Image (tube, rainbow, N blue to C red):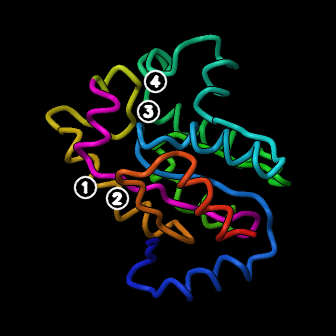
Amino acid sequence: MPSNHGTGSSEIVFKIMTKAFPSIMLIGMAGVGKSTVGKLLARNLGYRFIDTDRRLAEDAHIALAELIKQQGEDVFLRLEDHYIRDIDYDRVVVAPGGSIAYHAETVAEIRQKCRVIYLKDDISAIKRRVPNIASRGVIGMSEGMTFEDLYAQRQPLYEKMADVVISIQSRSVTQIVRQIISLVK
């Protein structure tokens, strides 16, 4: 059952349904399936799909982890912010990188154009899906910090940004997509 800071499910549906904007942004940690869910969701809705990490890497002609290593986190975050702001939010499903957590002001502006849905999962499930998370190019993970620390830091940021939180634990991609569609249609 989705939750939104203790809000009842009927209030969540009302909050989602009263937004007039058809686009969707899926947020959450690396490895929760934002791109997998996003592609299927976009196909089911007849929307475009944008994976901002993939788009950044393709435009830079370099792997995301290497881009972060070469340019640094601050430069990457500015590039990411530009990409996210530059999207045409008309009938699109956007899957930004997990570092969207550090773009609260941008997400607040984007919430005027689309629904923001946090795909939340248990840290152990994420680690099983992405065993070598550091190889993906993770922003905000300072020296000595564990992935668990990063998860604990980001989780409340995602929850604050989201219109709705969907727990994806033990659910198939199809089940998650169906739930999102039921909330936004």
Query: Which residue is drawn at the image coordinates 40% and 45% (left, top)?
Result: 29
Q: Is residue 135 magenta?
A: no
Closer to us: mark 4 or mark 2? Answer: 2
Q: Which residue is mark 1?
A: 152
Query: Which residue is drawn at the image coordinates 42% and 54% (left, top)?
Result: 168
**Where does residue 181 sit, x and y in percent of width and height?**
68, 62
30 relative to 164 in the view: left or right: left
Vertical arrangement, residue 20 with respect to residue 10, above or below: above
Label number found at residue 73: 3
Q: Are marks 4 and 2 in contact (CB under 8 Å)?
A: no
Mark 4 secondary-structure assignment:
helix
Query: Which residue is drawn at the image coordinates 58% and 44% (left, top)?
Result: 37
Q: Is residue 122 magenta?
A: yes
Q: CA distance from mark 3 to mark 2?
A: 20 Å
Mark closer to the chain start, 4 or 2:
4
Q: CA distance from mark 4 to mark 1?
A: 22 Å
- The type of residue carrying mark 1 is Ala
Q: CA distance from mark 1 to mark 2?
A: 6 Å
Q: Are marks 3 and 2 in contact (CB under 8 Å)?
A: no
